[in-house]
Image (tube, grey):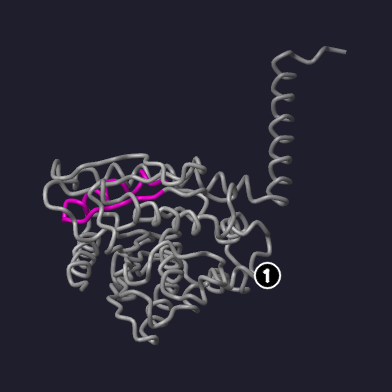
Amino acid sequence: MAREAPKRRVWKRTLFAILLAAGALFAWSLLSPVPAAWAIRTVFDIGGGTVARKLAKHVPPAGRNELLDVQYDANDPDAKLDLFVPAGKPARTTIVWIHGGGFVGGRKSDVANYARILASRGYSVASIEYTRAPQAHYPVPLEQANRALQWLSVNGPRHGVARDRFVLAGDSAGAQIAAQLANVATSPEYARALTIQPAVEARRIVGVLLFCGPYDAALTRTTDDGKPSWFMRTVMWAYFGRKDFWKDPRVASFSVARYVTPAFPPAFVSVGNGDPLQSHSFLLADALRAQGVHVDALFWPEDHAPALPHEYQFDLDTIEGREALNRAAQFLAALP
């Protein structure tokens, strides 16, 4: 009987190893969100780099000072922030930006150029990092953002950062964290429920900028059968640490749109008409208005073409992206 060719044996062994690895990865994905979360993180990190490069040409060449990778909590290696401060005249308001990435991805470097653009308009900007899921679970990023705010309040002035007028800002997952942080500062009952001591007094949070965030866990169940999509199931599983995240009692406080009060700061809320999270922004804007909070909403007609995707505001090559930036700047300028 003829012996099998060596190349054929190697090919068969390689194929077997690939199938074995794929089977093990599939089994792992049924027991843990880690494999899918890593895949999503990789996609977000690649996309964030692309956004940063596209924004680079819109950044004014001068007129600001920068301080990168400042440690805002000496006991937390992930607790870093970047500062962008206008050169010359001190800024009256500090924007604290929390990046997005589905709670599992994203980096502060993704939004650095957008922060530079805002700084060129006369604002000091702090862009913060936080620990991404599944390495940290809810509400760790919110607690980290609160500590960043505390650091800025204590140490900001020596770096030219205004500490008595904060605007909390964020995109996507970062917008949800920013909205929660604003509610922690302005609602003692909400802060007690989360066992978080607000870093600053409510009067020092003068506004919020919220782009494309998820503000209600119930709306993450978006498929026809009422279950979460694969993406939302993965990121929420990673963030809450349990597959049936909707049964976690902590998910109630995540749904910040249900807990806003009349003390919530004036809000600029925007989302694209092609964004799968669009309903979240509508819900939050309605909830805030029902409480008598001033809301400047930039929403687009349902038939707007082309449909504006998630995070549309970062594309300053489009009319709509520039409109979002200009409207946000007008909102900021009108804050008392």
Image position, residue 12 (x, y; %): 73, 25
Q: Is residue 140 magenta?
A: no
Reply above or below: 166 against 42: below
For image coordinates 24% across by 53% down, the residue present is 124
Image position, residue 137 (x, y; %): 59, 55
Circle 1 residues within 10 Å: few <14, some 14–19, many ≥20: few
The quadrant of the rendering that contains the N terminus is top right
Reply above or below: 46 against 172: above
Image position, residue 294 (x, y; %): 29, 80
For image coordinates 47% across by 70% down, the residue present is 215
In the figure, is residue 26 to the left or right of 326?
right
Q: Which residue is mark 1?
A: 247
In the figure, is residue 2 to the left or right of 331?
right
Q: Is residue 108 magenta?
A: yes
Q: Which quadrant of the structure image shows residue 297?
A: bottom left
Task: Give the magenta part as a residue range.
Answer: 107-128
For image coordinates 55% across by 45% down, the residue present is 39
